[in-house]
Structures are given as C-alpha cells and as structure tokens.
Image (cartoon, rainbow, N blue to C red):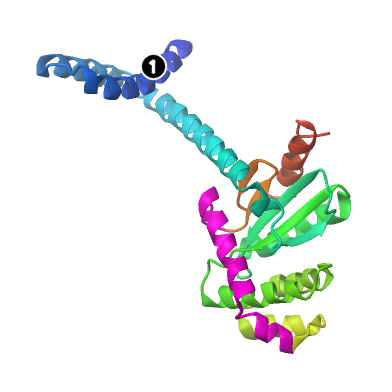
Amino acid sequence: MFFAARFIAAAIVSCATVFSQAAIAQSFGPAQRAEIEAIIKDYLLKNPELLQDVMQELEKRQVLAESEKAKSAIAANKEAIFNSPRQVTLGNPKGDVTMVEFFDYNCGYCKRAMADMMDLLKTDPNLKVVLKEFPVLGEGSVQAAQVAAALSLQDKSGKKYLDFHQKLLSSRGQADKTRALAAAKEVGADMARLEKDMNGPEVRAALEESFKLAETLGLNGTPSYVINNDVVIGAVGLAALKERINTARCGKAAC
C-alpha cells in the first residue's frame, strides 16, 4: 500500500506537467476534464495522506532543480567566484578545495560562523578560503564592507584583513563606518589611504561583483557558502561544513 501511494504521488506530480503540455496540442472536452478532475478529487479526499507524499516529491524535485541551477551558475562564473582579484583569500591559495563565504558584518549568524571558519583554517592545511563582502543588512553593513574592501587593497597577505575581520565580527553592537575604521586602525592600516580608497572605484567594483554573483547564485542571506560546485545556505555549523568539504575532496562525508 505504501509503495502504491508513493507511486501514485509521483504519477500525479508527473501527470500535472504532462497534462498541461498535452492540453496545448490536444485539449480535453468539458465533460472529459470534469470526469478527470472528479476522479482525482475523489481519490485525494479518500486518501488525504497522499498529499504529503506529493509535497515531498515536489520538494525533492525543487531541491534537485535548484542544485543543478546553482552548479550551472558556479561553472559559468567560476573565475569570479574562486579567483577574483577583488577577493580576500586565506588559508592555502593552492588548496584542493575552496570554500567561499558571503557574509555581512551585522549578521548574527555570521558572527557565530566565524569560529567555524577559524577552526577550518587551523585544522585543514589544504583548504582555500575566500571571503566576499555581501552587506545586505543596511547602511552600517555597507560602510563596514567598504572599509574592509579598502583594507584588503593594502594587505595582500590577508593577515591584517583577518585580524580586522575577527575584531569587527566579534564586537558588540552594530557595525558601521566608525566601528570599522576603529578596527582598521587597531590592526595597523594606513588610514589616510584607506579613507580615500573606501569610496573609490575599486571598492565599489568589488561590492558590485559580490552582489552580482550572489544574485546569479540565488543567494539572498548570510552566511552563504560555495564549496567547490556546491552552494550551502546558512550557518550550518562546523560538522556540516567539514562534511561538504570532505565530499568535495573525496566524494564522501569522511575522507
């Protein structure tokens, strides 16, 4: 019975598409449509639990479709996602797996996820980490991202940027221009250059690139990750990130 219900659920989902396409070429008459609708309605009323199977089947298909769409988007924008000259790269620049994080300095989940990134940087010598500013939480976030992007222009090693990143994400209160500039000063930034660069074309281009990539990948919140050809939405935790990295590296959750 369970197998039959699952089969019928899949059939109903498939038939919905088939009927909608077939109707274009050969439509049913009013009486036939009414009879078909009555049969389906009667069956569903007698077997309401089937709707759960239908929804699960639809969800599976949607997840699969979104995954395939994301993989296509990643493949089409590979260089900009993983190797943009405007990004900050940490860890092993020649690592066998790359984890890209889109983040916002005012995102509470990003603050908690920072510990996951730091753990991965310390424990995985073959991981390349890319950070992309994605300020979606207001003007303060945009200002903080401008300061961060400007700092990256004068810090090719990424060391000062990482110190700044940790300070700002671990601080209390809302990140904004004042807090971001204070954090940049603490890590030894050239403040005159930074304040000039933060409103310059290179910083603007970096932020525009991040937003364009996020839109292409279907990202609308932070943190969001790209791990090789896989998109991960949300602060999923250290264990889940390790599993995704291992899957990218060796095809399974544990290498």
Q: Is residue 116 visible in the rendered structure shown here? A: no
The residue stretch that appears in magenta: 192-221
Amino acid type of the residue that numbered disc 1 sits on in the rendered structure: Ala
Label 1 Cα neighbours within 10 Å, binned few <14 / some 14-19 / many ≥20: few
Magenta residues, dominant SS class: helix
- Label count reads 1
Nearer to us in this view, 197 or 119: 197
Residue 212 inside the magenta-drawn segment: yes
Q: Secondary structure at mark 1?
A: helix
Residue 98: image location, x then y, percent: 75, 48
Q: Is residue 168 shown above or below 33?
A: below
Residue 72: image location, x then y, percent: 57, 39
Residue occupying the point 82% across, 43% down? 96
Quadrant for the C terminus in the image: top right
Q: Is residue 147 shown above or below 34?
A: below
Residue occupying the point 67% across, 50% down? 79
Quadrant for the N terminus in the image: top left
Nearer to us in this view, 153 or 99: 153
Dividing the picture into quarters, in which one does residue 5 lie? top left
Residue 112: image location, x then y, percent: 69, 61
Residue occupying the point 70% across, 52% down? 82
Q: Is residue 59 left or right of residue 110?
A: left
- The residue that label 1 is drawn on is 11
Residue 190 inside the magenta-drawn segment: no
Q: Is residue 205 left or right of residue 153?
A: left
Q: Is residue 128 visible in the rendered structure shown here? A: yes
Residue 187: image location, x then y, percent: 81, 80
Nearer to us in this view, 36 or 25: 25
